[in-house]
Image (tube, rainbow, N blue to C red):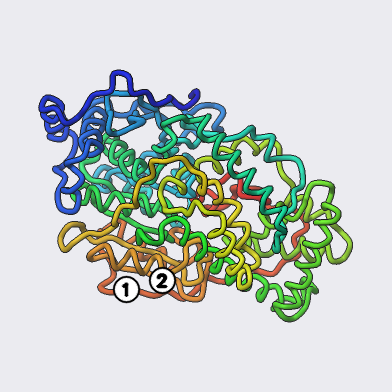
């Protein structure tokens, strides 16, 4: 679909003029319900008028669904199209971009149909183009009878016009070191690399770079709603996708029909950005400990010791060895870290990673090499995902510019969370030199009567989006109800392996009913302890589809 259309100010219109305001009112009258409640403060700014204009335009144009591109290798049951959004909502008649969208039509009869269900897997940097395929899975079959299942690629994410901040080959093919106790020289090297990455993002996107944000993502979502012909939005979002939904609920409460927030980010404006990264490193450390304890409980299978400390010892020795001699010539400590982070994200990786660790301890590096080596054929997609993640997170949050603050805080964090603290620092460090202007995070909050009932889902031990964020979101959205999967930690629980969670989700989507009060579910069954000596094919289960794979590191 070509490179991202660059932002230009030439010919842009100032929306404060009366003729433009009148056209915005006319567009909103045909395309969307009136913006009320918490969104009132936003209608005075140009972006609000721009959203109304873009939504009105999209409502008239619709989406011409047809065959999906052959390059996407999607089944005929999915139909694909595009919808147009402004690069800058303050200038809705300026440059636009076409965002890719997919749809699987509802399988039920006309009496069952309830409209479209849009899904955003978050990341940021993931697309949900394959999401409609979940309609084939038992947990989603009733929902698929009632809804057109709709996925899309947010701005910057392929197959929409893709952002990239460096050549993909720079990030693939060579083993790299990521010490848990970095030296002064290593830190200086990472500062240089982070600044170079920021410069690459600026060169790639120019002034449009600041429009890769969750706020612009929420506005894009309203344009998609209008393009689909939906007077109100039915939506499910995971991770940062849930944050986009929370912003949407704050900006456009009267446009909400039903919303599910799965494993949401903490929406407190004081914790969006830098503080969220520090909290995530602590949660990932705890979840990695859950993995180690599970391996220890299955010493009869893996032979790595009967305590979490014993298993950790094997992992630390592996780190030391691949730091000196990369496994297979391709897996250094950075690749090892990325692969085992998957185990802290999702427990469906536990058996694979434990098998690789056990095999290496017995002198066989091949399973580790197979699982953790960089894959040149995914390098372009990996870099695209990383570029969008970086841009959105840097634009969304508050980040210190002073390296001394980063060094102090991550040195402290690494004492308690050595597994993930510095890895998180390096991933986010481009935000220290990110160009201004920067926006302040929106205060996510709705009052009584602003929203219909909405549903929040969260696992108690989620390492990616700590559980406290779900509690905070439920508190801020008046009338929201929280369903908790206790003593579990896989990231993204809706439609996955827990029948109790899925019953709440399905009931809500089909009827609009939420539990009378916050509800709890017992944990889903832990993975089977199997000695797996090869990687499981990527994208074979519903959660891989929901996560917007195909390329989690080391799968």
Residue at (19% x, 53% y) in the render: 38
Q: Is residue 24 left or right of residue 492?
A: left
User: Circle 1 is placed at which residue position?
Assistant: 518
Q: Nearer the viewer, residue 192 or 114?
A: 192
Q: Are marks 1 and 2 in contact (CB under 8 Å)?
A: yes
Note whether 14 is above or below 463 in the view shown. Answer: above
Q: Is residue 460 left or right of residue 442?
A: right
Residue at (62% x, 59% y) in the render: 422
Which residue appears farthest toward the top when viewing the image? 11
Quarter of the figure with residue 297: bottom right
Residue 20 image point, x, y percent:
15, 26
Residue 314 image point, x, y percent:
79, 70
User: Circle 2 is placed at which residue position?
Assistant: 484
Assign a secondary structure to mark 1.
loop
Which residue appears farthest toward the right when viewing the image? 363
Q: Earlier in the sequence, mark 1 or mark 2?
A: 2
Residue 144 image point, x, y percent:
38, 48
Note whether 209 is above or below 422 in the view shown. Answer: above
């Amino acid at each position: 679909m070509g490179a991202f259309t660059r932002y230009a100010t030439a010919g842009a219109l100032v929306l404060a003029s009366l003729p433009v305001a009148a056209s915005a009112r006319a567009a909103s009258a045909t395309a969307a319900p009136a913006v009320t409640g918490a969104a009132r403060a936003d209608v005075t700014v140009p972006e609000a008028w721009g959203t109304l204009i873009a939504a009105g335009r999209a409502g008239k144009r619709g989406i011409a669904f047809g065959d999906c591109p052959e390059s996407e290798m999607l089944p005929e049951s999915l139909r694909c199209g595009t919808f147009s959004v402004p690069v800058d909502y303050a200038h809705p008649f300026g440059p636009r971009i076409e965002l890719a969208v997919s749809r699987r039509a509802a399988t039920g009869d006309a009496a069952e149909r309830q409209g479209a269900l849009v899904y955003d897997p978050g990341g940021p940097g993931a697309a949900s183009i394959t999401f409609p395929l979940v309609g084939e899975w038992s947990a989603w079959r009733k929902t698929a009878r009632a809804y057109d299942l709709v996925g899309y690629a947010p701005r910057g994410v392929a197959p929409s016009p893709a952002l990239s901040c460096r050549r993909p080959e720079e990030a693939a093919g060579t083993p790299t070191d990521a010490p848990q106790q970095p030296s002064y020289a290593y830190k200086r090297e990472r500062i240089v690399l982070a600044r170079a990455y920021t410069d690459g993002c600026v060169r790639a996107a120019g002034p449009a770079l600041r429009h890769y944000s969750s706020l612009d993502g929420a506005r894009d979502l309203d344009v998609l709603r209008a393009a689909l012909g939906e007077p109100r939005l039915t939506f499910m979002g995971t991770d940062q996708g849930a944050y986009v939904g929370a912003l949407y609920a704050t900006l456009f409460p009267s446009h909400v029909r039903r919303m599910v927030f799965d494993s949401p980010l903490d929406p407190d404006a004081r914790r969006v950005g830098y503080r969220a990264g520090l909290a995530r490193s602590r949660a990932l450390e705890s979840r990695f400990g859950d993995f180690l304890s599970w391996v220890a409980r299955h010493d009869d299978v893996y032979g790595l010791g009967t305590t979490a400390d014993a298993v950790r010892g094997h992992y630390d020795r592996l780190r030391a060895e691949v730091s000196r001699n990369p496994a297979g010539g391709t897996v250094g400590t950075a690749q090892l870290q990325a692969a085992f982070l998957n185990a802290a994200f999702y427990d469906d990786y536990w058996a694979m990673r434990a098998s690789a660790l056990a095999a290496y301890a017995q002198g066989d590096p091949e399973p580790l090499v197979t699982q953790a080596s960089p894959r040149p054929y995914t390098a372009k997609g990996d870099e695209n995902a990383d570029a969008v993640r970086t841009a959105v997170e840097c634009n969304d949050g508050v980040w210190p510019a002073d390296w001394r603050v980063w060094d102090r805080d991550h040195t402290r964090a690494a004492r308690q969370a050595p597994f993930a603290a510095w890895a998180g620092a390096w991933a986010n460090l481009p935000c220290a030199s990110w160009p201004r202007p920067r926006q302040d995070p929106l205060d996510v909050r709705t009052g009584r009567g602003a929203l219909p009932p909405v549903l929040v889902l969260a696992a108690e031990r989620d390492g990616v989006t700590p559980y406290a964020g779900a509690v905070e979101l439920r508190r801020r959205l008046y009338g929201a109800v929280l369903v908790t999967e206790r003593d579990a930690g896989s990231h993204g629980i809706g439609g996955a392996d827990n029948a109790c969670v899925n019953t709440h989700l399905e009931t809500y989507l089909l009827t609009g009913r939420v539990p009378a009060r916050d509800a709890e579910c017992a944990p889903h069954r832990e993975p089977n302890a199997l000695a797996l000596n090869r990687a499981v094919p990527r994208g074979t289960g519903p959660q891989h589809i929901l996560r917007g794979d195909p390329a989690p590191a080391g799968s």
